[in-house]
Image (cartoon, grey):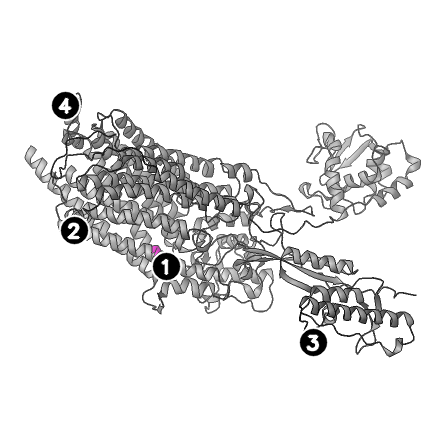
Amino acid sequence: MAPQLQLGALAPGPLPNSTEVYPPTRPGLAAQGAEVYRSLGCAQCHTRAVRQTQALYGARLNEVGNSPNTLLLPGLGGSDPKPVNLDLLLALATIRPDLTIAPLPLPPALVGDTNIVARLKQFADNVALLKRNDTKVGINRPTSGPSVNDLAGKLPAAVFERVSIEAGERAVKYLSDAGAKAELTFYNLGPDIERGWGARRTVAQDYVNDSPVLLGSVRVGPDLASLATRAPEKFAAPWKFASTNTAAEFERHLLVHLYNPRVLAKDSTCPSAGYLFNKQKPEIRAAGEPLTVPGTDAPVFPKHEARALVAYLLTQRVDTGVAEAPVPSAPKAVPAAAPKAPMKP
Amino acid sequence: MSQNKPKPSLQNRDAEPTVAAGGGVAWPFVMLGVVLFGCFLHVENSGGAFRADVYQSGVKLPPPMPNEPEEVKLYKTGAQLYAACAGCHQPSGIGSEALNFPPLAGSEWVMREKPDRLVRIILDAVEGPISVKGKTYDNAAMPPFRGALNERQIAAIATYIRGNKDWGNSASYVTPAQVKAITDATAKNAGTKWRATLLEAVP
Amino acid sequence: MTITQSSSQSAYSSAPTAAQVESACRFPVLFLAFSGGAWLFAGLTLAALASVQLYNPTFLEGCPWVTYGRLRPAAVNALTYGFALQSAFALALWFIARLGRVELSSPLGLAVAAKFWNVGVTVGVLGILAGDASGHDLLEFPLYASLPLIASYVCIAAWALLALHRRAEREMYVSLWFVGAGLLWFPWIFATAQSLLLGWQVTGVVQAVVAGWFGQNLLQIVLTGSALAVLFYFVPKIVNRPLANPGLTRAGFWLLLLIGGWGGLAQLASVPAWIPAVSGAANFLVLVPVASLLVSLWQTVDGKVVEAWRANVTFRFLLVAAGLLLLSVLRTAFLGGQSTQYTFFATARTDIVLLGVFGLSALGALLHIVPRLTTGEDELPSVGLTDLVFWTSLLGVVGVAAGYSLAGLVQADVNMNVTRDFLKDGIVASAERWMELNLSAFGYLKLVTAGYAALTVAALAFLANFGLAVRRCFVACCGGAR
């Protein structure tokens, strides 16, 4: 009975860093849909649990930042001067021995600026030192290919992807010490997550509002834990969305799938739930929109149960991070690189 | 257990099976010990130390995000400070019609675009008839909080009251700077409780 | 009526003979055994229909009552509560009567209680088909069906335990340990699980934990225990040797009770890591008691296996059941973890224990018990039908077990490999693949249907033979009495 002591008192609670309560209460129609889901025995073939096998880390460079060695150099072909953080380039070169270091030519317009000339010379010396160090410890830095300058040129940049937490934290420390803004990123991994069935593993907190809790034990069909967040191209392998991914289109697709699963997923072995649809327009006011199923002529009218079931499926989302299973943050939009004033001597 | 009935030489359909003489044996327990040891190792390695928040042993979670937004901090502080208000306005913010305590949940005095009226009420309290959600209340029991709470605390309470989704409130949060501005602007009013009619002039 | 008279005549004798105790328990045991057989037939028919829908989704399309989502739980619950538990009651009563040398009092009342059990199962199965399933594995009966089940169970178990208490033979033989443990275990787990899931609903995933715990206890302790009672009764009796190594048996019994119920959550996701870890460990630990018990049986039978196989049909059933018991424990221990999570491999386990370990033992035992209680002969009237029961049930169990397990392994491979198409390589392939060959006509899942069909034939043959025996008995007894 230890599980009850540990998990029995779980209740919807606030998420870290927000006032949102998780999991949110299901709206009435979706709550009725949960009963339809149970009654039809959908859980006999569909699980509602995302598994995760690993969590790996990475480092993301968000801003070049401002250090004493940040110079405003004109871009290669353009006229806009770009801030170049020399310390950052060195730090990147240290943590990524697989990248080349492109030399920084002195722009002709700045030949007269003694400060810039001195700093660039210092940089060249440091690079030479780094390369000598490389040979000493046995690192073979390639002579051609992508360079650290390219990496720092397109932000936000993934400096490391899928490495251990130690490597990720080390990279973030190096980059921060160089004055750049970097953050530790992480990746939830596992076949389920890579199939697009959810952003993270499911945890006990996700099911607090459910009763009965229908986790399912066999996957004859795909997992439904995060059906509502599925990316268009990852929607149960054979499913593809036409163009958009609006809620209305999603709802219509689910209704068509319920009516005849083979229309959208050729290999599906899901029995049709045609009994949830009326062939004739029912004599009630709330008949709702008719549904046109591809390959058939006459439109059908989804019954209340069908709409409830779809509403329930649309509440299936595992995209909110919780303390015990966070989700990766999306990369921030390219920061409006407000170039800091260049260093004045 | 070890009684031996006379055994029939042929299979006798009425005879019951019997038990041979024999004592205990040790090997199941030795085997149990060996397997148990392996099991302990297994649970030690993958059991996550029996913690409720470990869903996979050996996987390090990222450190929690360092900075909560300011309004979240204010809201959480406010939730604690609201205990002082809950006595009359109730923990659920519904007040009490019978005891003449006006509600905060869904109140048009709370849910204004600007927090000016709410902050003024918290600072210097209000007395006399006041109409909330169609009911008129008249209660002089509200104490003024000017001086008792600092600007940040008042901002926290106002944020909690205005943004409490459980009550159905969803107004914007209140910053300590706003509270400071109002405190300074009404400094000459200190010690006098507001009247609803006076407050109605406030945006 | 003649039965009650004969029992009252001999009620005061201290140790009734085998014939006397058998005539006293005749009616309830036969009733339970026959309705068990009938539910076996019904459940297998439902299971066969359900398995067709796994690869032919348009089969029986258009009616919610007969879609897979309802047929499958209806089948599993009909087999569990209708066939397995009911046959277990029949066996328990007979063992208590025989091994305890005790005459059951008022057997007609017991039969009425058994009737209520059947009513409960019928209501439950119809409830599932109508869409009232509770949604928890092996506990799908709606609450309104569970209550008559509990009430009827209390009567049957109280009756059986009272008889056990009044037994003339004070020394309890091994089989009675298992019978007694099962009779006490089932009400505990059933009442606990029902009250936690349907009455006072526990929060969140604890429901899944409770359901998994119940299923594991039901399969591993109540039903496997009942199968072991059969094994320990008939094996020494058939080879006509005393049970070797009782110390080993005792150790195995207590360890099974101690450990058996802890597994069953090894494949649960969305719970803290320690729950599947502990459960997986328990799945390994349970190898120890099962090995002790099987070794003790093996020592008893050593050297006489071939002889007994030829001579006795019950022994054949028991040998296969014992093999399946070992197999089921081994496969759960070694492959029952994350690697086969959410595949048919887990489904196969329920079917192996229900139909293989318990089903074959029970059929074997009933083939011995039923003729004794009806015609008084050693075997059922038709030897041909008896052989048919054995071979079809053997093939059926092997087909279901192998089909689900192999399909599960195909699925597990696809589950773990993102580059494989989930539906096409996993589900469709497991219906159309045989080893390395692509056969659209015969795949693993189709083997399952064939297995269920063979088992259905076995159930029918058993019922027919049963009917023949009862008819002959009626002709003989009633004709003679008049």
Task: Point out the tag, 1 or 2, that comes first from the N-terminus.
Answer: 2
For this view, does A33 lie left or right of residue B157? left
**N-terminal of the two: label 4 or label 2?**
4
Q: Name the quarter where the N terminus of chain B is drawn.
A: top left
Which label lies toward us, 1 or 4? 1
Q: Which residue is mark 3?
A: A143
Disc 1 to disc 4, C-alpha distance = 58 Å
Q: Amino acid at mark 2?
A: Leu
Range of residues picked out in magenta: C49-60
| Residue at x 70% of width, y 32% of height | B90
Question: Badges 1 and 4: C-beta atoms under 8 Å apart?
Answer: no
Q: Nearer the viewer, mark 1 or mark 3?
A: 3
Taking the view exactly as shown, the residue that stands out farthest to the front is A136
Foreground residue, C286 or C30? Answer: C286
Q: Residue at x 17, y 27 (%)?
A: C4
How far apart are the two marked residues, 1 and 2, measured between alpha carbons? 31 Å
The residue marked by circle 1 belongs to what chain? C
Residue C54 in the magenta stretch? The answer is yes
Which quadrant of the figure has residue B120? top right
- Disc 3 residue type (three-letter): Thr
**Residue C199, disc:** none
Q: In this figure, which residue is indicated by the disc labeled 2?
A: C385
Give residue C286's position: percent from left, percent from top.
38, 43
Q: Estimate the spatial distance between the alpha carbons at disc 3 and disc 4, rounded to whole Å.
A: 106 Å
Specify the label residue C406 is tagged with.
Answer: 1
Which one is in front, B173 or A140?
A140
